[in-house]
Amino acid sequence: MDRLDIDKKRAIELGARYVNNFWKSLPEEEVELTILSGGYSSRLYLVEDISTSTENPIKKFLIRLYGGKLIPENDPVKPAGGEIKETLVFYAMDLNKLGPKLYGSFDGGRVEQFLPSHMLREEDYKQRPETLLELARKLARFHSLDLPISQERYDVLNVCEYYHRNRDFEKFRKLAKHLGVDDLSNFEEFDIKSEADWSRSLEDAVNGRIVTISGDVNKNNVLVRDEPDTFGERVMMIDYELCARDYRGRDIGQVFLMKIFEMKDGYFYICCDYPDEAWRRTFVEEYLKETRSLNYFEWDEKLDSVDHLLMEAEFFMFHSVQLFLGFFTNVKDDSPLFNMPVDQAKSMVSVFMQMIDVYRNRKANFVEKYGKQLDSKN
């Protein structure tokens, strides 16, 4: 069981300070404190008033403590701005009715509204087809936000190259041995430097819009609410630590990539195939429809066409895979992966290994479909 990094006394103090005064009168035995996430980048706790009183208008709230168990504080994967930036983005999402309410911010964390919900799963796409459309619209609205964050583009390939320069593959082999993984050929044959160079050579030819991206649109960062929001939608994006200015295609490509796997109780697994063109096209069509209604830039019929954005998303998805694999294989002696349950860490290795297969398949498809077109622009 994960260790609590906060006690009931502190939780009650934060509730009284930021949620409402009723929390001040609650004894600790009438408060329940539960870990919702051990967190790869932060730790999340549910605080609940379990008393019989009906006077408390807000009987549940969340406390998020910054600093996770997987990403070091000084890791270059984190864009400039850190915790201050993330809190600003959270507040902007609140003001724009795109996310939970921010009750307050304190050194080391924040207090958030609790909204009954569950993490996005493949079953949601199957049972509620509108889930796909709602996520496309939410992402479009996120991209339209004008935020006080660094306006310099976050060059993810620079980070990939950093991981390549600093990688000691012997340490990754040590981790693999610890986990009982014998075949590392997929990782050993994936040359991050060469792949990043290939991507760099095509960026200008592909082109795309620079917007405010989430940078981490995985299923665990997309919630499906029990009740609709003010837009009449149930999909909600959370976790903005990697928010930055970058190509919109990176977020959209992540939606495509992250559809194929999920995490349950800390274990990763492949849940479906890479989405087919009809699924991807439907997502992009809805995204562009919503983007056009937001009217935050001068529309370009070619750059902002469905076909061009599909190409953008497919291409910038490769950036995300290169980043994930660079980070994942850049193992240090104190890596949290050594301290996870072996089968849990092994599930992560398995998914990343299969991600390389997806990358190769999609790259071959991309080159066949767009190679000549892009070569003519270089």
Image (cartoon, rainbow, N blue to C red):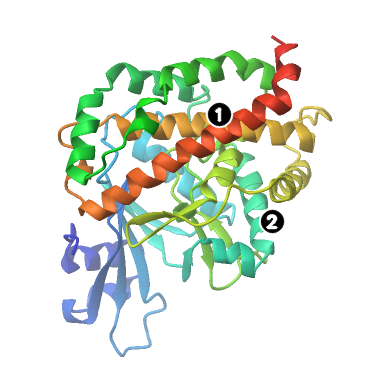
Q: Is residue 231 above or below residue 178?
A: below
Looking at the image, residue 347 sits to the left or right of residue 369; the answer is left
Q: Which residue is mark 1?
A: 246
Seen in the picture, residue 95 relative to 358 is either above or below; the reply is below
Q: Which residue is mark 2?
A: 133
Sequence-earlier tag: 2 or 1: 2
Task: Mark 1: give few (<14), some (14-19) or many (20+) Cα within 10 Å.
Answer: many
Task: Give amino acid for label 1.
Answer: Asp
Which residue is at 45% across, 29% downward?
322
Residue 344: image quadrant is bottom left
Which residue sits at x=66%, y=50%? 136
Point out residue 137 in the picture as x, y percentages from the top left corner. 67, 51
The amino acid type of the residue labelled 2 equals Leu
**Element at label 2:** helix
Question: Residue 46, how many percent across, how many down?
Answer: 32, 67
Residue 168 visible somewhere in the drawing: yes
Task: Return the residue found at the far bottom.
Answer: 52
> Where is residue 57 shown, x and y percent of the image?
42, 78
Quadrant for the N terminus in the image? bottom left
